[in-house]
Image: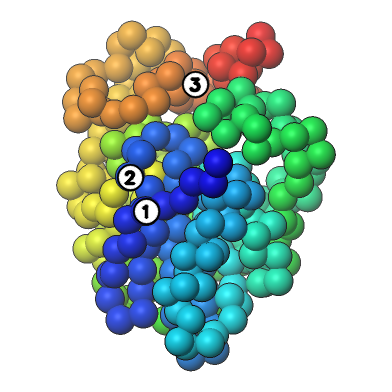
Amino acid sequence: KRQMPTHLVELGQGVFALVDPANRFGYSNVGLVIDADGLTIIDTTATPDRGEAAKQQIIELTAQLELPIKRVVLSSSRIAFSGGGNAFWAAAFYGTEATSDQLDAPPNPPAFRRLLPDFALAYPDDFTTRPVTHTVSEAAWLSPAAMAIPLSGEAEANLAVRVEGAAVVFAGALASFGVTPLAYDGNPAAWIESLEAIRSLEPTVIPGHGPPGGDADVADLIGYLTACIEADGNPNRIASGPWDRWSDRRFDPVNVERAALLGRGIDEIPQSMFALLGLA
């Protein structure tokens, strides 16, 4: 069954978000920026079918313009954001060097099936992703409207896209509103710094998961990540906050353990992540 984002949000002249109303991890959003030379897409959703469905919605929206899908920006290599990439194969793919390296490595369909059980059938053993064709190591204009900005936190290196003309930042994997983020090999402290940078750029933030938001939503995410750090390795010690109402709190142990490991100078995947995937 093909599923796709159903809420099309117009953010400014030629700037849109395809927002998935599910508010659960894996039901990710897609950004669209229209320039005279073509379309820029931000993230590709979690599965090939969802990527194809988003592509068709974009084609229908822009049919009268007769513009090609020229660029795809991946905010992260994570399957929730890159899994639909093959639907956009003809476009140039932009990502950080870390994202490129990770997508060049063999995918792990069994892990994807465990992480996103709703989409398990979308990840057969021969599942592949679209590799990055252009790496971005510093802030750069990808088009007259869209600037890619490397930031870290959710992963070693992520990309956000700023569209100053619409006062919007597509934060992708770096923002999650109403949905618990996952930092299994990220850095919650660095993530907080990146979120502080994002909140200083533009008033509207489009997250990778959840509805469009702004400063208050970014502040809540900073609060959650801070609570994970302060829990000192014990997920039961996460302070109460707006995140009490978020989905996917199954990621709490992973985020707390990862923060505690980094606090001790240990850079490794938390055992709780392996447990989440049924590998421990």
User: Is residue 144 at least partly visible in the picture?
Assistant: no
Residue 131, position in %: x, y? 73, 57
How many numbered marks, from 0 up? 3
Looking at the image, tell me whether mark 3 or mark 2 is earlier in sequence order: 2
Vertical placement of 17 versus 166: above or below? Answer: above
**Left or right, residue 217 beside residue 151:** left
Q: Give the mark, 1 or 2, whose residue is nearer the N terminus.
A: 1
Label ID, residue 254: 3
Residue type of the residue flagged with mark 3: Val
Decide: is 151 above or below 62.
above
Point out residue 221 in the picture as x, y percentages from the top left corner: 30, 38
Left or right of 266, for residue 168: left
Of helix, strand and loop, which one carries label 1?
loop
Residue type marked 2: Pro
Helix or strand or loop: what does disc 3 sit on?
Answer: helix
Q: Residues within 10 Å of mark 1 (few under 14, many from 20)?
A: some
Does 61 sit left or right of 261 as displayed?
left
User: Which residue position holds label 2?
Assistant: 21
Res 203 quadrant in image:
bottom left
Q: Quadrant of residue 190?
A: top left
Across and down, in percent, residue 263 comes to 48, 24
Are discs 1 and 2 less than 8 Å apart at CB? yes
What amino acid is labelled 1 in the image? Thr
Q: CA distance from mark 1 to mark 2?
A: 7 Å
Residue at the image position 75 percent from the left and 34 percent from the top: 124
